[in-house]
Image (cartoon, rainbow, N blue to C red):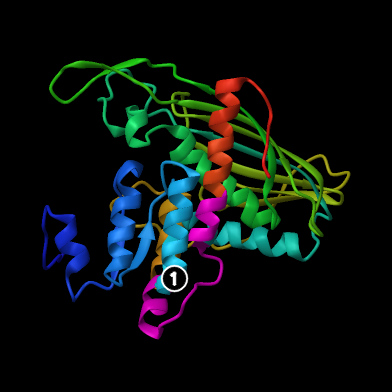
Amino acid sequence: FGIGHFTNDWQETVRRDDVDLVCITTPPSLHREMTMAAIENGKHVLCEKPMAMNADEAREMTDAAKKSGVLALIDHELRFQPGRRKAHEMVREGAIGQIRHAKYHFQAPHRGDPKVEWNWWSDESQGGGALGAIVSHIIDSFQWLMGTGVSSVFCQLQTHIKERSDSAGVVRQVTTDDECLLILRFAPNELVADATGIVSVSMTEYPTYKNRVELYGTDGAIAVEHKGEVLVAEAGDTEWKAVEVPLGDAIPGVPDTGFSRGFMAFAPEIITAIRTGASEIEHAATFQDGYEIQRVLDAAKESDRSGQLVVLD
C-alpha cells in the first residue's frame, strides 16, 4: 500500500508532527481515549462508529473537538453514496411529500456461521455487536435523510450464537447482539409528518446480503438498495420504478458494497477540507451527529433491558 511508516504504538502516531489526520478504526471501547489524545495533539479525527461506548463519552469527545477547532468527523460514509445523495435531494424537492414512515432492512450472513471466531465483535465490554456497528449507520441515515431526530425507541436485541471459539480454540461466551429490531418515532418538521420507523438488522440470516432504506410519504416513496440503486413510486403506483443514478466507484480489493462506494466519494472531501483548512464538510457526519446517534443507541439498550418504550428528551 506504499505506507511509509508503521508502528504498534498509537500514542506515537498522534504525537507525530507529520500526521494531519488520525483515523480511529479500533473497537469502540478505545475511541474516547484515542480521540481525546488526537485532539489534544491538534490532529483532525475521523472516528469509526459507534462513536463511543455511551452518550457521556460522546459528549466529552464532542465538547473537546468544538473547543479545539479541529475537523472531527464520524465515518458515516453512506451519506456520500450517490444513490443516498439523490434520495436526500429528492426528499428536499418534495418528491414524496411529507414523510410518514421509514423502513430499513439490513442482513448479512457472515456471523451466522458458528465457526466464525470470537473477537471484539462478540464482547460487550469492547463495544461489539450489531446495534453499535450497524444500527448506528441506520439511525444516521434516517436522521440525515429526514432532517430530524428520533423521539422514541422500542428495541429488542437477540443473540442467536451464544458461544464462539477464540483464536486459541478456547470457547468463550458471546455477550453482544447479532440481531436488532427497533420501532421508532421521529420528531416532526417541514419534511416529516407524524412519522414512524421500523429497523430490522440480522448478522446471521441467509442467503443474501441486504442493505435497503425506504421512505414513504404523502405523495410517494423512495428506496435505495445497497449499492446505491434508487427506486421511486408515486402515490397510487403498484410497482417501483428505477431512477438512473451513477453508482460511483468501489474500493479496489474489498467487497463491493454501498459502504466502499460511499467512502470512495467521502475520502477526497476529507483531503480537500484538510488542505483548505475547512472546519466542516457538507453532508459529512460531525461529532455532534455522533453524539445524537449515541443517545438513540443508549435509549435502545435501555428499552431492551426494561422491555419498555423509551422517550428521548
Quadrant housing the C terminus: top right
Q: Residue at x 75, y 48 (%)?
A: 187
Left or right: where does residue 160 sit relative to residue 283?
left
- Percent coordinates x, y for residue 1 in the rendering: 17, 62
Q: Work out whether residue 213 or residue 8 is closer to the camera in this orientation and state it.
A: 8
Q: Residue at x 29, y 47 (%)?
A: 26
Q: What segment carries the magenta color?
A: 269-292
Q: Can residue 255 be seen here? A: yes
In the image, residue 134 above or below residue 276: above
Residue bearing mark 1: 67
**Does 275 appear in magenta?**
yes
Q: Work out whether residue 19 or residue 295 is closer to the camera in this orientation and state it.
A: 295
Q: Work out whether residue 126 or residue 137 is closer to the camera in this orientation and state it.
A: 126
- Percent coordinates x, y for residue 223 in the rendering: 67, 47
In the image, residue 215 above or below residue 91: above
**Does 103 appear in magenta?**
no
Question: Local crowd at mark 1 within 10 Å, few (<14), some, or many (≥20)?
Answer: few
- Percent coordinates x, y for residue 56 in the rendering: 47, 47
- Percent coordinates x, y for residue 38 in the rendering: 29, 63
Q: Amino acid at mark 1?
A: Lys
The image quadrant that residue 129 belongs to is top left
Q: Work out whether residue 115 or residue 185 is closer to the camera in this orientation and state it.
A: 185
Left or right: where does residue 28 sit relative to residue 311?
left
Left or right: where does residue 312 sit relative to residue 269?
right
Q: Can residue 1 be seen here? A: no
